[in-house]
Amino acid sequence: MKQHEQVLFKNRSPGETAFLETYRKSGGYQGLEKALTKMSPEQVREEVKKSGLRGRGGAGFATGMKWSFFPADKPGEKYLVCNGDEMEPGTYKDREILMADPHQLVEGMIISAYALQIPVGVIFIRYAYEQCSRNLERAIAEAMEAGLLGKNILKSDFSFELHLHRSAGRYICGEETALLNSLEGVRANPRSKPPFPAQKGIFGKPTNVNNVETFANVQHIIAHGSAWFKNLAFTESGSGTKLYCLSGHLERPECFELPIGISLGAVIEEYGGGVWRGRRFKAALPGGASTPYLTAEHLGVGLDFDPIEKAGSRLGTGAVTVFDETTCMVAATLNLNRFFARESCGWCTPCRDGLPFINWLLEKIENGQGEMGDIDMLREQIRNINGRTFCALAMGAMGPMQSLVDLFEEEIIDHIKKRCCPLKT
Ligand SMILES: Cc1cc2nc3c(=O)[nH]c(=O)nc-3n(C[C@H](O)[C@H](O)[C@H](O)COP(=O)(O)O)c2cc1C
Ligand code: SF4
């Protein structure tokens, strides 16, 4: 297993969490000091833009670009929100950061708040992440005590307060506008956009939302520079490292920090230890449960935003789930769709009614009662959902679904012709 430069996992050690002393010894809070003493907020924003950092929460939006829409120079009530809801099946990278080295998020948020001139921040964390919450509470208290957080940080004229908010525990709470509603104490339905959170977020005030891994990268960019960050990637289009969290039919389903752009095949073979039990590879979700499947012909594809999109999928959260040759892709996709149907907030009809209808169709096919017309019906449902919903939950659900009918149509036909699941016989 080749070792690559560890940035976010530099202090990761089995069963241990790095708190302030360890974090500072490893260079922690040097980025903050540099930002506050040597850089203007605009220079920090510019450095992040030059670094090419793209959001690690799923959509891959360029962070510098997102920040450029924020009214940083406008005084008044503004909020910085960290999205740590992390409820997409297969995704557990933010948890790994918070278990190993929680000060990275705290420092990343303070620097981001300085860049955007925001006085108040909130970390919205998944309800089930109890130990991560405790780690963050301690990290926030340590940073306050050391004068790194709160009033006049490091004796500068910049002040920032940071709060922790535990999510009520639904997948939809991770959608950024549903998250804002949840923080306001109302039902977590997504809001229609525009207006975007940068203009009208919590309590109607400008709000910037980023993912845990996105924020955690910020102080490294400021401490070491945007050119260093870009060079960490394998691909020309990429920058930085990525936490790839592996799951499914692998010998070693763990989370690894690797250069952006490393190939899917290398991640599976070298780091995941290969497909388990000596079986053959059938498919993988490269970026979480809401991304289209890739197959054996894609093993050479670099796990970076642009190359994956060219191959027909998305980098998403970088959660790689592998399926071996014995997997029934109809059953696997049904399992995913059941999750999305259950987590629908019910606000729009194509999602609320379409996802359960797709469950019914796939159950029928899986149980040997499918008809040839069901495949067209499935395609029609996908068309009816894509682009017609308030948020991306339903469209995300259509990622694996579309690739099921495109890449595994023969397997669906086999179910229908044999009147059973061929992989169960
Ligand atoms: C249903 C749904 C769930 C989501 N869950 C999360 C999540 O748990 N964490 C996250 O960072 N982004 C999640 N997102 C994406 C956010 O809406 C948003 O794009 C992201 O937090 C922005 O951060 P980034 O630019 O740093 O990636 C979700 C989106 C959808 C549609
Ligand atoms: S797509 Fe689904 S989860 Fe999103 S707003 Fe519509 S009903 Fe709610």
Image: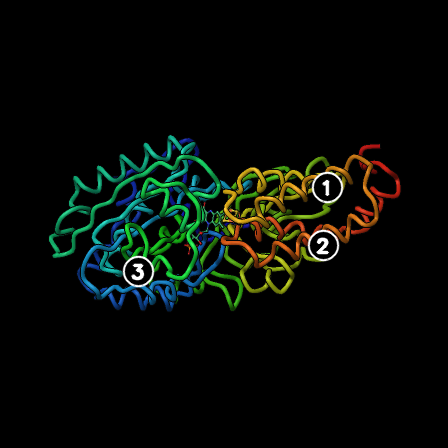
Residue plotted at (22% across, 38% down): 142
Q: Position of residue 380 (x, y in %)?
A: 70, 55
Q: Is residue 25 left or right of residue 394?
A: left
Q: What kind of residue is marked 1?
A: Leu
How crowded is the residue under tag 3: few (<14 C-alpha within 10 Å), some, or many (20+)? Answer: many
How crowded is the residue under tag 2: few (<14 C-alpha within 10 Å), some, or many (20+)? Answer: some
- How far apart in space, not on screen, are marks 3 and 2 (Cα)? 47 Å
Q: Please tell me the numbered disc located at residue 222.
A: 3
Q: Position of residue 88 (x, y in %)?
A: 52, 43
Tell which tag, 1 or 3, sits nearer the viewer. Answer: 1
Residue plotted at (29% across, 56% down): 112
67 or 373, which is in the foreground? 373
The total of numbered circles placed on residues is 3
In the picture, the quarter occupied by the C terminus is: top right
The relative height of residue 105 versus residue 198 in the rendered view (above or below) is above
Mark 1–mark 2 CB contact (< 8 Å)? no
In the rendered view, how is the structure colored? Answer: rainbow
What secondary structure is marked by label 2?
A: helix
Q: Which residue is mark 1?
A: 362
Residue plotted at (63% across, 47% down): 354
Q: What kind of residue is marked 3?
A: Ile
Q: Which residue is mark 2?
A: 379
Q: What kind of residue is marked 2?
A: Arg
354 or 69, which is in the foreground? 354
Q: Residue furthest right?
A: 418
Q: Position of residue 292 (x, y in %)?
A: 63, 53
Q: Is residue 279 left or right of residue 344?
A: right
What secondary structure is marked by label 3?
A: helix
Q: Position of residue 104 (x, y in %)?
A: 33, 47
90 or 17, which is in the foreground? 90
- How far apart in space, not on screen, are marks 1 and 3 (Cα)? 49 Å
